[in-house]
Image: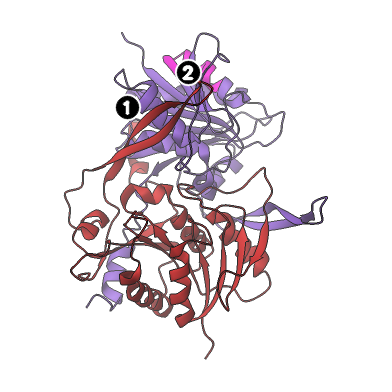
Chain colours: A red, B purple
Amino acid sequence: MTKPLILVSNDDGITSRGIYNLVQVMKEIGDVIVVAPDSPQSGMGHAITVGDTLRLDESFVFEGVKAYECSGTPADCVKMARHFVLLGKRQPDVVVSGINHGSNTSISVLYSGTMSAAIEGAIEDTPAIGFSLCDYSSEADFTHTLPYIKKITQQVLDKKLPAGVALNVNFPPKRNENIKGIRICRQANAKWVEEFDQRFDPNGRRYFWMTGNFANFDKGEDNDEWAIANNYVSIVPCQFDLTAHHAIPALNNDWDIFG
Amino acid sequence: MTKPLILVSNDDGITSRGIYNLVQVMKEIGDVIVVAPDSPQSGMGHAITVGDTLRLDESFVFEGVKAYECSGTPADCVKMARHFVLLGKRQPDVVVSGINHGSNTSISVLYSGTMSAAIEGAIEDTPAIGFSLCDYSSEADFTHTLPYIKKITQQVLDKKLPAGVALNVNFPPKRNENIKGIRICRQANAKWVEEFDQRFDPNGRRYFWMTGNFANFDKGEDNDEWAIANNYVSIVPCQFDLTAHHAIPALNNDWDIFG
């Protein structure tokens, strides 16, 4: 039986610990190819490189795995993997992205380079999953996520996903008690309230660091913030159709500028 | 009566023709403040600046209008406008972004810096609109869009928008016949098929330009591609909840890894 072809990318860059761990798990499941950014791309959202050039070079950071580092964004990586590296060859059976070193729950999915790589998979009708660990510590332990990553990826390969859907999977940080299980969730209603830390450079010109606080307004138990807080793995099925379909009849009925 | 406060941003940069035109229209409607990128940011999607510093300087490109140029992305601009420039002062009644020099219909909404500025407005519960002209010509004529931009912005100020919704407004290029009217649409099912134009730099090292062709699979007449092709203004209400709600019961029913 042919092993599945697995395309791996991320947004923390090809030398990060998260993608190293992800590649090790994927080697147990199928044939692996990596196309990942040559440097960290956090917060890149669904950016692509237009008006500038791209570089792509072979990388030897993963033993026994064909890998490329790309100067572009995570979305660029998936596009280059499909339309250049794999062009005319076998296309991937699944796209996996991560393991992101930090949370991509609730509103963070919008800013997430990890998820943009997964959504590029969904746009091309390939089942796709972004994995993130909700732990920003530099010594974050990824080990408790690995059996779940294997199980979820195998499930996606077996059962596929609805058309146009990519999974946003977040893991709680490693705690003393074991993970309680997996929850299919909706994106929580929460956001960042930014602050700008104003400083002055050696020439006296001001600059800023964006910081901020996370504000969770969601009282439900069916969302990803609740799942992570309660030590579950959260899985949010995400789509790239941004249409607020419910708003279409409201605008058609209430507005009077169609005449 | 107090005039509405209008926050203007874009992704083509503060000196572009599109934002110049947009500011002229907004001056007829309300008090205007501009926070826009200091350089072009096309294709930035919903990127934000993390792990790097931001600059913000006053700009004098618009006569009689308070304006700032920011080194960050369109999303950064709206965040800085709200949480630094306007902090503790009156907050905007509407956020408008554009006029983008090029189309943001169908899948392009995902890669659109113009729309990321609008969606930042929606995240903060402010009615928000992104305007784009589907004409890439360097001599593109914006004049036919201006009466519609005024009418749509006034309508949004009068009637507000459903919570969490921002409008993606696209205009057909100026043609011989007049625009036929306005259509509320869904995002068309279409995508880009990328190609990578491989070249070699003076040192013999290869690099790439991303190009591609647009492929429209959508046969409906209720989508933005149809509207533009038929000389209508398209308005797609967009949301930042990416949850594919329809997929939640499917995953809960079909999967067997919850035990």
Q: Callout 2: 10 Å neighbours few (<14), some, many (20+)?
A: many
Which corner quadrant of the image does residue A165 belong to? Answer: bottom left
Q: Is residue A24 visible?
A: yes
Q: Is residue B27 magenta?
A: yes
Can you say which quadrant of the picture contains the N terminus of chain B?
top left
In this picture, is B145 found above or below A234? above
Please tell me which residue is depicted at 57% across the width and 76% down the height of the picture: A65
Please tell me which residue is depicted at 30% across the width and 76% down the height of the picture: B255
Please tell me which residue is depicted at 34% across the width and 30% down the height of the picture: B126
In this picture, is A148 found above or below B84? below
Q: What is the x, y in percent for residue A161?
A: 41, 70
- Residue closest to the eye, B158 or B227: B158
Which corner quadrant of the image does residue B193 belong to? Answer: bottom right
Judging from the image, mark 2 belongs to the subunit labelled: B
- Of labels 2 and 1, the one closer to you: 2
Please tell me which residue is depicted at 67% across the width and 64% down the height of the picture: A84
- Left or right of residue A186: residue B183: right
Q: Callout 1: 10 Å neighbours few (<14), some, many (20+)?
A: few
Q: Amino acid at mark 1?
A: Lys
Q: Is residue A127 visible?
A: no
User: What label does residue B26 carry, if any?
Assistant: 2
- Say whether mark 1 and mark 2 are on the same chain: yes
Q: Which residue is mark 1?
A: B159
Magenta span = B21-33
Mark-to-mark CA distance, 2 and 1: 17 Å
Q: What is the x, y in percent for residue B24?
A: 54, 16
Looking at this rendering, what residue extends furthest in the bottom direction?
A1
Q: Amino acid at mark 2?
A: Met
Q: What is the x, y in percent for residue B244?
A: 35, 58
